[in-house]
Amino acid sequence: MINTMKQRVINLVDTMPKGAELSWTADLKENQFAWVTLNEVEDLPLFAEKILPEGRLVTISACNAKAEDKKAFHEVCYHFVIKGLSVTVTLLPTGVEPSVPSITLWHKSADWAEREMAESYGITVRNHPNPRPLFLHETVQSEAMERLVPLSTMTNSASTNSLWEKIMGEKGEES
């Protein structure tokens, strides 16, 4: 079964118009893992469509791009499973306003993950059927989760009214 699914992944990668890189790994129990890197983000919808009907999307994750990927700030990984075979598809959205196409049309489970990625990382998801923020209010800037607050600032503010003033947006009353 796994060899059949491996061949399916190989054939799928070969159909990508702009090309893709494929590698394989195995764990100590000899479970196989496919790693696909798309050369062009625009090939993602085709991959998402062609992995059906056996394949399903498990989740999507975004992280900082590797140092050698100078054109991209983030790397986006789409984690699929095809009858027990794990397939991770990686792409690098580039540009001033990085974007990826939505795959919600083919994989309904992409809905929340794409919205969270847009909200947390500032990666635009084009043609998403419901692009509203998932967690944050519309007035909160995107990429808010990436801002760092030094622990010393947070603990110092926790013992004063400063923290509550920042949260509430106004000066609190003295007791």
Image: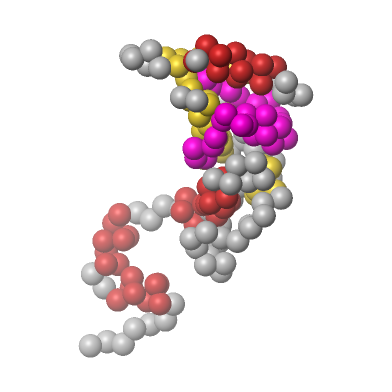
The image quadrant of residue 151 is bottom left
In the image, residue 56 lies in the stretch drawn in magenta:
yes
Left or right: residue 90 versus residue 18 is: left
Instruction: Determine the residue positioned at 53% across, 31% down.
Output: 80
The image quadrant of residue 22 is top right
Q: Quadrant of the C terminus?
A: bottom left
The region drawn magenta spans 34-61
Instruction: Determine the residue positioned at 49% across, 15% down.
Output: 2
Instruction: Determine the residue positioned at 57% across, 29% down.
Output: 54
36 or 3: nearer the viewer:
3
Instruction: Determine the residue positioned at 67% across, 51% down.
Output: 128
Q: Vertical placement of 109 versus 36: above or below?
A: below
Q: How many marks?
A: 0
The way the protein has been coloured in the rendering is: secondary structure
**x and y, in percent, of residue 19 in the image:** 71, 20
**x and y, in percent, of residue 154 in the image:** 31, 61
Look at the image and tell me whether residue 99 can be seen.
no
Left or right: residue 96 versus residue 9 is: right
Q: Residue furthest right?
A: 17
Q: Vertical placement of 15 versus 52: above or below?
A: above
Look at the image and tell me whether residue 87 can be seen.
yes
**x and y, in percent, of residue 37 in the image:** 60, 24
**x and y, in percent, of residue 101 in the image:** 69, 42
In the image, residue 57 lies in the stretch drawn in magenta:
yes
Left or right: residue 135 versus residue 53 is: left
